[in-house]
Amino acid sequence: MSLERELRLMGLQPTKKQIDRLVNIAIDEYRTQKISDFVIKSTDEKFQALLLSIAMAKSLSEIMYMLQQSDCIKQEFKREFNNLKKQADKVGKMFEMDSRKVPELHSAFEIISDELSEIIYCSLDRMQEVNKN
């Protein structure tokens, strides 16, 4: 059943924009709850920093994938760039495999990594929009 249908059954007549906003709020709350259930309640600051670092490595690897074949990177730098991408990918995959043993940790890791990637993609989109104008 869709959110729109549920709201209409309650007697509400939301616009498409209002439904989209409610969906985004629900997604944000779900993600926040999943992360806070496991990560935020942890009092180990080093664990929290480790989780964020590894999630960043995974996001970095994802973003760097589109740059690997780019001509804008000079040869020597490109070799180091590719090594960094390879290591970030390796660390992300290793942690992802280990974290599957603890579903709450795995879920939190995936959400944090996705959020970081989304921030980067949104920033890239904004930069492209600015450059078009």
Image (tube, rainbow, N blue to C red):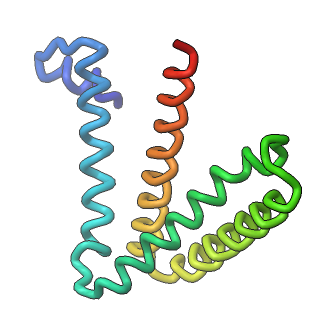
Q: Residue furthest left?
A: 11
Q: Is residue 82 left or right of residue 91?
A: right
Give the quadrant of the N terminus: top left
In the image, 59 versus 40, the foreground residue is 59
Q: Nearer the viewer, residue 127 or 42?
A: 127
On screen, residue 3 versus residue 58, left or right, reads: left
Q: Where residue 111 sits in the image (x, y, percent)? A: 43, 58
Residue depicted at 50% across the width and 45% down the height: 120
Residue 77: x %, y % from top left = 79, 60
Residue drawn 56% across the image and 58% down it: 59
- Dividing the picture into quadrants, the one containing residue 4 is top left
Q: Is residue 47 above or below residue 76?
A: below
Tally the marks. Answer: 0
- Image vertical order of residue 80 relative to residue 21, above or below: below
Q: Which residue: 53% across, 76% down?
A: 100
Q: Position of residue 122 (x, y in %)?
A: 47, 36
Q: Is residue 113 above or below residue 101?
A: above
Q: Nearer the viewer, residue 54 or 10?
A: 54
Instruction: Answer left or right for 59 relative to 83.
Output: left
